[in-house]
Image: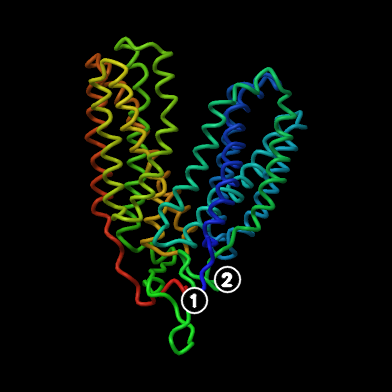
Amino acid sequence: MALKPRLFYGWWIVVAGFIIVACGSLSSEFLSNQLPGLLKEHFHSSAVTLGTAFSIYGLSGSIALLAIGPLIDRFGPRKLMLVGIPMAGIGFILLSFVNSIVALNIILGTLLGIGIKAGFLLPVQTAGANWFIRKRSFALALVMVASVLGEAAINLFGEQFEGHTDWRMVFVWLGVGILVICIPLTFIIRHRPENYGNVPDGNTVVSDEEGEPGTETTSRVLEINFTLWQALRTRAFWLLAIATSLSSGINAMATIFRVPFLIDKGFSQLTITDIFRIVPLIGLAGILLFGYLGDRFPKRYLLAIAVVLQSASAIILMTAGNTTQLYLYTLVYAFGSGTLPLLLAIRADYFGRKAFATITVVIMFIGTLIGIPLSMPWAPLAGWMFDVTRSYQLIFLSSTFLGLIPAAIFFFARPPIPLTDTTSPSES
């Protein structure tokens, strides 16, 4: 007789992870939005000082990720979270006491830069990827929704902090909130279901007619498990890394010119701001939709479709003559941005759970190395196009056609050939 819990424990991990990621995203976004003004107002800092502070903050976190990924895979997400979350919480509290740029840079480069990376998004993503296979995309979509909600909350309500509350107390409350809310929830996060007598997606142990323990048929699906070095030798790894970098870079460059283009077409700045304000909300719907579809259709095809949607949205923008068309552009563009859960899930599908966090951070690092040199000439080239043609049309057309390149790469990024030591989820 099968004994099944009412709710698979993996969903409790998603709920706890949702809250943790939302707290981390909100705190990180508040830091990025408010710190420049605080530096300028209270420390009378120059642009160089401001740039240095954020460079230290971003660089320390990016470098730390290369070590955090392997540590998560080896020791589990919870242990890293119990290091990172206290670091971030204490960092925010100490930030309220700083009176010098040196102290600020130390806190940003250590407690906050490393703590935020180690304590929040990546560990929760890894736990979600480990506890789900058949429902992996949707589980990871819920985690990414939390990340976007945290950012959107600051964008919508961040101005409420200005002029009404002492900024030092805001940082104290952020730090205390992280410690009080996130640390208890961290104990719900678990590494892999096999460590607790379960298997991914909630397929529980059952007894056959002779009373011998067995597992449901759906739990016997074979799973690939690559190490990082094995993954690096596959064609799929490099196709995913290159396509991810190209798609994000090309779409980011296209958005730079959309506001001046629309102003030239007669739209007011207020109208543009109001319409683009809904992009994160529609993006949430796109994340959930693609997360749902990712568990039912090949993810590489869905990624290609999403990239084509974002690229094709530039054509709608070019022909926009009224607010209805502008809303249509916003809808298509925002839905196309819902690829985040698919990018995470396809890595776990292709390379397994054994080195998920490690492979994720390496793909991010490689994507940055590829993206920077490719994106640097694009903005000057786009500016040259405008100077020559006195029109933004060629810029948007170029962005549309260039977007077809990563879409094609995703489309042809077939799964790697399984290794000879392929194991089932219950054995990994």
The x, y position of residue 249, in whole percent, is 36, 37
- Image disc number at residue 427: none
Instruction: Determine the residue positioned at 25% across, 33% down.
Output: 312
Q: Which of these two is toward me, 212 or 307?
A: 212
Q: Earlier in the sequence, mark 2 or mark 1?
A: 2
Q: Amino acid type of disc 2?
A: Tyr
Q: Label 2 to label 1, Cα distance in Å?
A: 12 Å
Disc 2: which residue: 196
Kindly state the secondary structure of the residue where label 1 is placed.
strand
Residue 144's place in the image compared with 174, above or below, is below
Disc 1: which residue: 205
Kindly state the secondary structure of the residue where label 2 is placed.
helix
> In the visual, does 39 lie left or right of 145?
right
> In the visual, does 9 lie left or right of 370?
right
Q: Amino acid type of disc 1?
A: Val
The x, y position of residue 412, in whole percent, is 23, 54
Instruction: Determine the residue positioned at 33% across, 38% down.
Output: 336
The x, y position of residue 411, in whole percent, is 24, 51
Instruction: Determine the residue positioned at 61% across, 50% down.
Output: 119
